[in-house]
Image (tube, rainbow, N blue to C red):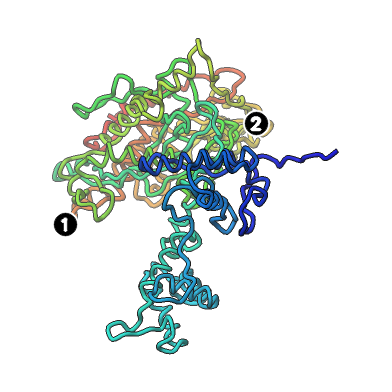
């Protein structure tokens, strides 16, 4: 008994070699299934063309379904036998090099299925250049090489080639090898070379269809993003809020000033542009946290500070901007949504910036959260497209509308002189910081079409809905004694002290002693190695013995260093100035106030020079030091067997006279202890 083997479905419809005879038996078996033919749309056809297409379609379907009964097919198609067979084999002819059949496009009236190919010599020049290239493949190869090299050298391609330039290079080769009068070296009284237009059309068509020419003709950046917008999609890494978070830094296109009280009165000194580091949820588009840098370069500490904001309850700033206010729905997830006390994401998407490869991110941030870190390639902005798009919206609707904007570039007609505008309008740095917080908080409360008309905060809040619970916030791994926590730097130290003279044990860090009442009694620990956990505020540090035993929180014994919060970078900068004898020293002085006084004097000297005002590095350092002193995020909590004793201020410090030589920075609010 004969067994009929059916062909597999979803096979590629490849046409057989052209067959000269008609008949149902001449049609390959897998092509008889018309349901697999390439389909077309008849929406744009005229009524007459559409009627013709429908009756021929009915006729061909009847012919194939009935096993080749021509009479029934002709009755449906209402045409002659010759026309029917012609239209049928027109549908079955291959239209490309892969052998794909034309399908139902073959019965559309006056539709050309193939490009024109010149066969005979005849008169005219239509298709003659393509015919000549087909007969001379070595010249086609030469032309392709010139196109790929941009008419440059044999090894190095030229940049930004032109159609005329490549065509001219090819014509020169033809004129040197082919005598006059032989195609394509045909000259007339008005044209020295008649085939130039054909060559340029061929080059243009080749560049349009061959993606390998993109790098030479359109540049490296365009070539790098050719895989975008092709219809291929990568799988989503995030299944819920905070699963994947993007992080990047952006320089704000706006200039601010710092007002310093000088000998001749208040002086307005421009500072460098603010640099913003944000953490944005890839799924909900919600800004989770941010940090600001007023330094020449962003560091990994700013990324850690942005994460620390995700673990701290957000409080609105006290605004002094007049009509600029927070919206009713503004805020950040930690502090605005009930049930979210900290944000612990599962994945962190970063770009290829140098600061993103620091140990603070690879070790402290990654291990403490227990997340995955993904780095993008150099210049691959689409790996963090959500963050990049956010920066564009922030500039267009925020800082580019200010008088001191840098614009979109040097050729932007809306751009004036940003430094002069900042000085003239008095746009202060602390006002820019307030405006930045308002813009980010309002962004989280603004509805978006991409989120179905909901705001980012509403999207997160809906995911926590108790009636339709679809998501549970992720918990971080518990901190251990050896856990590297964000915002905390671990430094090796030794317990010092003198038993003979009864000098209580202490730990010295950056020229300053630290101790607490418990450590001061432990003379048996003198000489032991300790690990110091240093946070953003160096007035207190945490200490652990080399075996992991906690020593509690140690407080700075220097009266001046214990007044105002400061980071380790600030202390190192102050110690360097003290060593260079540019700053005074002593237990009765406030180093932070002296440091700001020093920076203010340096900024005043730069502002007192004649000519156009310029951005001052000293004023930028002063503004950044002031920002750190007034807004230090608390570090992540550490495990302790018992609560540490509250920091004590020595009685001598409480009754000490006010420190001298303080210069008030006009326009910047100082801590209460400094006034």
Front disc: 2 or 1: 1
> Taking 370 as reference, is 258 above or below it?
below
Which one is in front, 155 or 624? Answer: 155
The x and y percentages for residue 398 are 27, 37
Residue receiving disc 1: 610
The x and y percentages for residue 615 are 26, 51
Quarter-of-image position of residue 97: bottom right
On the question of residue 149 being in view, the answer is: no
Residue 268: mark: none
> Taking 345 as reference, is 353 above or below it?
below
Q: Residue furthest bottom?
A: 179
Name the residue: 57% across, 41% down.
Answer: 71
Which one is in front, 96 or 429? Answer: 96
Which one is in front, 403 or 662? Answer: 403
Q: Quadrant of the N terminus?
A: top right
Q: Are marks 2 and 1 in contact (CB under 8 Å)?
A: no
Q: Residue furthest top?
A: 467
Q: Residues within 10 Å of mark 1 (few under 14, many from 20)?
A: few
Q: Quadrant of the C terminus?
A: top left
Residue receiving disc 2: 525
In this rendering, position of residue 591 left or right of residue 511 = left
User: Closer to the N terminus: mark 2 or mark 1?
Assistant: 2
On the question of residue 609 being in view, the answer is: yes
Name the residue: 63% across, 58% down.
Answer: 17
The x and y percentages for residue 454 are 38, 23
The x and y percentages for residue 611 are 16, 57
Name the residue: 42% across, 31% down.
Answer: 285
Q: Residue furthest right?
A: 1
């Amino acid at each position: 008994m004969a067994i009929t083997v059916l062909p597999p479905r979803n096979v590629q419809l490849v046409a057989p070699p052209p067959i000269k005879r008609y008949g149902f038996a001449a049609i390959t078996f897998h092509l008889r299934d018309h349901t697999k033919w390439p389909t077309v749309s008849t929406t744009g056809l005229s009524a007459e063309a559409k009627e013709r297409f429908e009756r021929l379609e009915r006729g061909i379907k009847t012919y194939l379904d009935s096993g080749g009964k021509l009479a029934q097919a002709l009755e449906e198609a209402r045409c002659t036998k010759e026309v029917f067979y012609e239209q049928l084999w027109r549908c079955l002819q291959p239209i490309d090099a892969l052998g794909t059949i034309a399908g139902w496009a073959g019965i559309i009236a006056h539709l050309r299925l193939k490009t024109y190919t010149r066969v005979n010599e005849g008169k005219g020049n239509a298709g003659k250049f393509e015919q000549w290239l087909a007969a001379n493949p070595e010249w086609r190869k030469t032309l392709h090489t010139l196109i790929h090299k941009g008419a440059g050298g044999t090894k190095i391609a030229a940049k930004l080639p032109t159609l005329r330039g490549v065509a001219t290079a090819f014509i020169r080769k033809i004129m040197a090898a082919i005598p006059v009068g032989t195609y394509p070296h045909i000259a007339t009284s008005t044209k020295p070379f008649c085939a130039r237009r054909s060559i340029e059309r061929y080059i243009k068509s080749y560049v349009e269809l061959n993606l390998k020419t993109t790098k030479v003709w359109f540049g490296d950046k365009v070539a790098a993003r050719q895989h975008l917008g092709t219809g291929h999609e990568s799988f989503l890494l995030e299944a819920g809020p905070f699963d994947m978070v993007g992080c990047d830094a952006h320089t704000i296109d706006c200039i601010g000033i710092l007002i310093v009280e000088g000998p001749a009165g208040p002086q307005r000194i421009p500072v460098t542009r603010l640099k913003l580091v944000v953490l944005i949820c890839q799924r909900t588009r919600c800004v989770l946290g941010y940090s600001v840098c007023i330094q020449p370069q962003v560091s990994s500490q700013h990324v850690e500070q942005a994460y620390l904001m995700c673990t701290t309850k957000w409080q609105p700033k006290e605004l002094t901007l007049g009509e600029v206010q927070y919206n009713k729905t503004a805020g950040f997830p930690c502090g605005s949504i009930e049930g979210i006390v900290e944000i612990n994401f599962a994945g962190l998407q970063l770009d290829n910036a140098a600061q993103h490869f620091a140990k603070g991110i690879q070790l402290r941030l990654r291990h403490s959260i227990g997340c995955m870190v993904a780095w993008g390639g150099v210049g691959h902005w689409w790996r963090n497209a959500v963050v990049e798009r956010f920066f564009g919206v922030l500039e267009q609707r925020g800082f580019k509308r200010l008088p001191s904007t840098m614009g979109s570039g040097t050729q932007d007609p809306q751009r004036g002189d940003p430094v002069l505008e900042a000085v003239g309008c008095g746009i202060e740095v602390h006002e820019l910081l307030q405006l930045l917080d308002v813009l980010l908080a309002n962004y989280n409360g603004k509805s978006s079409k991409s989120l179905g008309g909901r705001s980012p905060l509403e999207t997160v809040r809906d995911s926590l809905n108790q009636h339709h619970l679809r998501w549970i916030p992720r918990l971080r791994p518990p901190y251990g004694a050896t856990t590297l926590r964000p915002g905390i730097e671990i430094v090796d130290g030794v317990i010092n002290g003198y038993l003979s003279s009864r000098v209580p044990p202490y730990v010295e860090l950056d020229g300053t002693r630290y101790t607490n009442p418990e450590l001061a009694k432990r003379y048996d620990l003198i000489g032991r190695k300790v690990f110091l956990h240093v946070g953003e505020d160096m007035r207190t540090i945490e200490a652990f013995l080399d075996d992991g035993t906690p020593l509690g929180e140690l407080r700075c014994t220097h009266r001046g260093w214990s007044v105002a919060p400061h980071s380790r970078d600030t202390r190192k900068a102050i110690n360097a100035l003290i060593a260079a004898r540019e700053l005074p020293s002593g237990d009765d002085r406030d180093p932070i106030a002296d440091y700001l006084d020093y920076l203010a004097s340096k900024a005043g000297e730069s502002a007192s020079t004649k000519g156009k005002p310029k951005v001052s590095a000293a004023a930028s350092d002063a503004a950044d030091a002031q920002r750190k002193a007034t807004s230090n995020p608390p570090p992540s909590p550490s495990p302790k067997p018992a609560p540490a004793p509250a920091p004590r201020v020595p009685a001598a410090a409480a009754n000490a006279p006010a420190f001298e030589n303080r210069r008030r920075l006009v326009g910047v609010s100082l801590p209460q202890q400094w006034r």
